[in-house]
Image: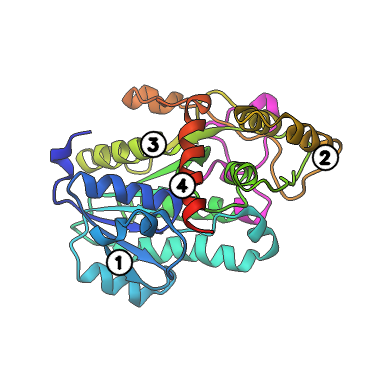
């Protein structure tokens, strides 16, 4: 990625203090971009843990507040936007759909409507999810970009609705330069939602506490490393900036190597040679059923490869050490 392109670019990242947002801000500030971000309130985040916030301009407020968003846009000359702000926890969405829908649906149309008729904006990337597709039979996977949504559960519905809103604003009626991304599960340094599988597993090992499985381990998922995702965000946003014909496009990204939850658990526990603890977890998994989650979720990167020759650089096995080391350092400093 050309550092020259990003030098002094005016960037807005919603959800800049989230897992992906923090890593994206870290990369962009390193490339010389002028990065601004919207936060709701200060929280545990890579953004502060690695002092990335000192290189950014932060605005504190609600993504659903139209006057707040409009005021920020009016006072800044943003060229590129990454809309990452969302309520991302499936369990929270199942318990509190209203809060999730407010953030993920209302937040999306509030932001996009605020950029309507804005002549300075050249590129908007809206982060959706593989979950927006809903549940498809295993034989119909990987998900393809032209699949219709079968979303039922609250989080999945919130992303599917946001996708429809994005489709409207990128249409010929409004002509906003938007690309929608639907990625598989993202993991890596800085992910501090410990309800997510990989942070929960690593924390359990480091702190020597029992890992509580939520199902029988047969559910299939795909995991993409954060550095691959940041590379992809920069690629897509710069391509859209230069080529408006990409507006309205949707791109899936996975590794083409889906894994069962049980395989993920085994890889991480075997990495630290925790055979006794692993055996206990596998026994607890037997006949345990999940509720409110899609059983099979994975996708490929065939469209991305066709358009841009993109493919992931990192495999799960070769990133385990780096992930473990980051969490060890973080948990040692945040007891």
Percent x, y for residue 268? Answer: 61, 32
- Where is 77 relative to 236, above or below? below
Give the quarter of the image for residue 16: bottom left
Marks 4 and 3, how far apart at CA: 19 Å
Percent x, y for residue 308? Answer: 32, 26
Q: Which callout, 1 or 3, points at the residue further toward the start of the chain? A: 1
At horizontal 47% and vertical 51% (from top left) the residue drawn is 330
Which element type, helix, strand or loop, lies under badge 3? helix
Q: Residue 302: give its label.
A: none
Give the magenta-colored segment's residue range.
127-156
Residue marked by disc 4: 329
Q: Which callout, 1 or 2, points at the residue further toward the start of the chain? A: 1
Residue marked by disc 3: 227
Give the quarter of the image for residue 303: top left
Which element type, helix, strand or loop, lies under badge 4? helix
Is residue 25 highlighted in magenta? no
- Where is 199 relative to 283, above or below? below
Residue marked by disc 2: 284
In the rendered structure, are the residues bearing label 1 and label 3 in contact, judged by CB atoms less than 8 Å apart? no
Q: Which callout, 4 or 3, points at the residue further toward the start of the chain? A: 3
Q: Which callout, 3 or 2, points at the residue further toward the start of the chain? A: 3
Residue marked by disc 1: 58
- Where is 325 relative to 157, above or below? above
- Quadrant housing the C terminus: bottom right
- Frontmost of labels 4 and 1 is 4
Neighbourhood count class around disc 2 (C-alpha, 10 Å): few under 14, some 14–19, many 20 upward: some
Marks 1 and 3, how far apart at CA: 23 Å
In the rendered structure, are the residues bearing label 2 and label 4 in contact, judged by CB atoms less than 8 Å apart? no
Marks 2 and 4, how far apart at CA: 29 Å
């Amino acid at each position: 990625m050309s550092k020259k392109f990003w030098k002094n670019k005016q960037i807005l990242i919603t959800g800049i203090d989230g897992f992906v947002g923090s890593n994206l801000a870290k990369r962009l500030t390193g490339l010389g971009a002028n990065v601004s971000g919207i936060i709701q309130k200060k929280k545990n985040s890579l953004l502060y843990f690695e002092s990335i916030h000192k290189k950014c301009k932060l605005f504190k407020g609600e993504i659903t507040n139209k006057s707040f968003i409009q005021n920020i846009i009016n006072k800044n000359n943003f060229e590129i936007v990454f809309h990452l702000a969302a309520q991302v926890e499936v369990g929270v969405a199942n318990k509190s759909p209203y809060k999730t829908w407010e953030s993920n649906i209302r937040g999306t149309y509030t932001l996009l409507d605020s950029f309507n008729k804005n002549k300075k904006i050249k590129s908007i990337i809206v982060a959706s999810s593989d979950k927006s597709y809903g549940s498809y039979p295993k034989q119909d996977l990987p998900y393809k970009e032209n699949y219709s949504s079968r979303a039922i559960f609250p989080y999945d519905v919130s992303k599917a609705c946001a996708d429809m809103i994005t489709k409207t604003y990128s249409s010929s009626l409004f002509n906003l330069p938007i690309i929608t991304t639907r990625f598989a599960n993202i993991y890596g340094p800085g992910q501090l939602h410990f309800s997510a599988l990989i942070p929960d597993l690593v924390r359990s090992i480091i702190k020597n506490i029992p890992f509580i499985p939520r199902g029988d381990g047969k559910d299939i998922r795909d995991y993409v490393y954060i550095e691959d995702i940041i590379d992809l965000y920069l690629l897509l946003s710069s391509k859209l900036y230069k080529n408006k014909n990409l507006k309205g496009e949707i791109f899936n990204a996975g590794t083409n190597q889906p894994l069962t939850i049980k395989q993920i658990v085994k890889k991480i526990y075997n990495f630290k040679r925790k055979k006794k603890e692993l055996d206990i977890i596998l026994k607890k998994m037997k006949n345990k059923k999940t509720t409110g989650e899609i059983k099979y979720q994975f996708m490929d990167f065939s469209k991305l490869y066709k358009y841009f020759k993109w493919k992931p650089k990192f495999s799960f096995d070769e990133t385990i050490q780096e992930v473990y080391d980051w969490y060890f350092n973080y948990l040692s400093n945040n007891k």
